[in-house]
Image (cartoon, grey):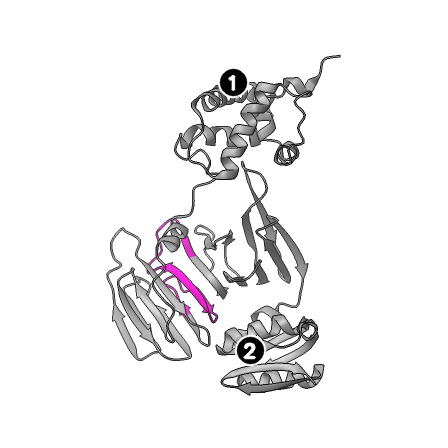
Amino acid sequence: MKNNFLDRKAEDILTNDFLIEKLTKEELSENKYNNNELHIAKKIHRTFSEKRNTLEQTPKDLLGIRISQTILKYKRKKLIIRFSSAAVFFILIGVGTLFQMNKEPGIRTYAMDNQFGPVTENTRLILSGEKEIQINSTESKIEYNVNGNNIEIDTNHKIKQDAEGDEVVLNTVIVPYGKRTLITLSDNSKIWINSGSKLIYPAKFASDKREVYLDGEAIFEVSHNKNHPFYVVTRDMEVKVLGTVFNLSAYLDDNTTNTTLESGSVELKYKNNSYLSQSKVTMVPGMLAVYDPSQKKVKQIKVNTKRFTSWREGYLVFESQSLGDIVKKVSRHYNVAIRVNDHELENETFSGSLDLQNSAYKVLEIIAEIIGAEVENINNHIIITKS
C-alpha cells in the first residue's frame, strides 16, 4: 500500500497546525516523509522561528512554484478558502517580508518608533510628536472638537493644532503612576486612561478607520458607527469595536492582556501558534478574556465587570484576590512603593471594595486588618508584614 505521508509537500506541512507542532519538536520522521520536502519545510520553519528576512533561493523558488500549483488544485476541489489566503499572501509580500504573517498596524509601528523620553511626574500631552504640554492635575480631562484642531484641557486651557489636512496627525497622552486622564476624542468616544498608561490616537480620524494604540489600562466608551469600526491596538492584539463599553489592561510588566466587556460586543484578534493565520474571539457582556502571549491563547471567564471598571468611579472591587495583585494595583494608583515581607502573605486573599479617596496607607490598613497583617510607613515606603 502506498505511503500517503510520502506525498506530503512542504506547503502541506506548513499549513497544518498539528504537523507544525511536530516539526517544532523534531518529531517528523524522515522515513515517513519525502526527505526533500521535509528539508524544505524545516528551512522555512527555521526562518520563521529565527525571524530572518530571507530564505535560501532554492527552497524559496520551489515553494513559490508549489504554492501556485496547489492553489489551482484546491480551487478545483472547492477546498481552497484557508489555504489560498495563506498562499497568495506568501506570493504577494515578496522576498524581503516573507516571514511576516500580517502587516503591522501603522499605529503600532509608530508606537514602537516613538518612545517619547522618560516618564515625568506630570501627565504629558504630545502633539504630533513635537509640541508637549505638561498637565499637573491628578484627574485631568482632555477634549477634542470634531475637527481635531481645538483641544481643551481641564476646561481652562485651550490649544490649537493643524489637523485639517489629509495626513493623519497622531497625538500621545502619557499618564504617570498616581494620575488618571479622561480624554474625549474627535468622534466623541470617551477613554478613561489609568495610571502608568500611554494612549496614541489621531487628532481626527481618517474617513475609513478609527484606530488607537494602548500601553497600560483604559476604559473605552466608544461612539457607535457601524460603518467605521473602532480598533484598539496593543503590543499583542487588536480589539475591534462597533460601539460599546469595555476595559482593556495591557501593561508591559504584566504577563497577560485582559479585556473585560461591560456592554456591546467586541472582537479580539490575536497571534496564535500558526504562522499562516490569526485567531479571532467574539466577546459578550460580562466576560473577561485573558490573552497569554507565551501560550498564544485566549481564555474567557464570566466575571463581575465592576472588578475591572470601578476605578473609573473612584473605588476598587476585589473578589478573593491575592494581596500581591492588590498591592500592584494600589501601587500604580497612588504611585507609592509597597513591599510585602512574606511570600505566604502575598497569597492571602481579600474580598470587598476600597474607597480610593483614602490614602494608600489607609487602604492597605483596611486590608491588613482583615487578613491579619501590619502596615508601616518607613521613608515613604509602605511595608506589609505578618502580625
Dot 2, how many residues are within 10 Å of its Cα: few (below 14), some (14-19), or many (20+)?
Answer: many
Residue 93 in sight in this render: yes
Q: In the displayed image of the protein, which residue is found farthest to the top?
A: 1
Dot 1, how many residues are within 10 Å of its Cα: few (below 14), some (14-19), or many (20+)?
Answer: few
Where is residue 155? Give x, y as percent: 34, 78
Q: Nearer the viewer, mark 1 or mark 2?
A: 2
What range of the chain is rendered magenta?
183-212
Rendered image: mark on residue 338? 2
Q: Is residue 372 above or below residue 234?
A: below
In the visual, does 143 lie left or right of 321?
left
Q: Residue at x 64, y 60 (%)?
A: 287
Q: Residue at x 65, y 81 (%)?
A: 385
Rendered image: mark on residue 69? 1
Say what secondary structure mark 1 lies in: helix
In the visual, does 101 lie left or right of 323?
left
Where is residue 262? Give x, y as percent: 59, 64
Q: Residue at x 66, y 68 (%)?
A: 304
Q: Is residue 71 above or below residue 371?
A: above
Q: Residue at x 39, y 67 (%)?
A: 174
Identity, as a three-letter code, of the amino acid under mark 1: Gln
Say what secondary structure mark 2 lies in: strand
Identity, as a three-letter code, of the amino acid under mark 2: Ile
Q: In the rendered view of the protein, which quadrant contains the N terminus?
A: top right
